[in-house]
Image: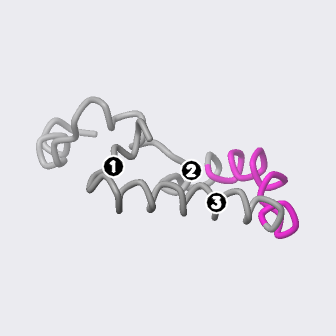
Amino acid sequence: MTPEQLRKMPWVPPMFRPLERNMLDLDAPDHTRLRGLVHKAFTPSLVGQMRDRVQTLADELLERVMYEGEIDLIKD
């Protein structure tokens, strides 16, 4: 990027900078390469197998926030 383009970019806290470069924001060939690495972990069957565990975790976190009034999404 040119210096002018960089100046126009929004400020991002340093702790979030590693999240700026992810598969969803990439174009081919990088996106294609990364998708090839992860697609086997997210088949409909495997996602279905994870559904109950993910739902349980989400319910526990939501219940905690109801009782405590706040939540730290990173720590919790």
The quarter of the picture where the N terminus appears is: top left
Please, what is the three-letter code of the amino acid marked with disc 2? Answer: Met
Query: In the image, what residue occupies the spot 39% across and 46% down?
Result: 73
44 magenta-colored:
yes
Residue 3 location (% of width, % of height)? 16, 35
Q: Check whether the beta carbons of the residues at disc 2 and disc 1 lie within 8 A of each other.
A: no
27 with respect to 18 (left or right): right
The Cα atoms of the two marked residues, 3 and 1, are separated by 16 Å
Q: Quadrant of the C terminus?
A: top left
Seen at 34% across and 35% down, the residue is 17
- The numbered dot on residue 56 is 3
In the image, is 6 to the left or to the right of 20? Answer: left
User: Dot 3: few (<14), some (14–19), or many (≥20) neighbours within 10 Å?
Assistant: few
**Helix, strand or loop status at disc 2:** helix
State the mark number for residue 24.
Answer: none
Which residue in the structure is indicated by mark 1? 71
Q: Please, is residue 67 above or below residue 20 in the view?
A: below
Dot 2, crowdedness within 10 Å: few (<14), some or many (≥20)? some
Q: Amino acid at mark 1?
A: Ile
Q: Which residues are magenta?
A: 31-47
> The disc labelled 3 sits on which kind of residue?
Thr
* Residue 21: x %, y % from top left: 45, 42
Q: Where is residue 22 shown, x and y percent of the image?
A: 51, 46
Locate residue 38 relative to residue 29 in the image: left or right: right
- In whole angstroms, how far apart are the C-alphas of marks 3 and 2? 27 Å
Which numbered disc, 3 or 2, marks the residue that appears first in the sequence? Answer: 2
Reading the image, the residue beneath label 2 is 23
Q: Are marks 3 and 2 in contact (CB under 8 Å)?
A: no
- The local crowd at label 1, few if under 14, some if 14 to 19, many if 20 or more residues have their Cα within 10 Å, is few
Residue situated furthest front in the rendering: 67
Find residue 16 and report its horizontal and vertical position in percent. 33, 37
* Front-most of residues 29 and 10: 10
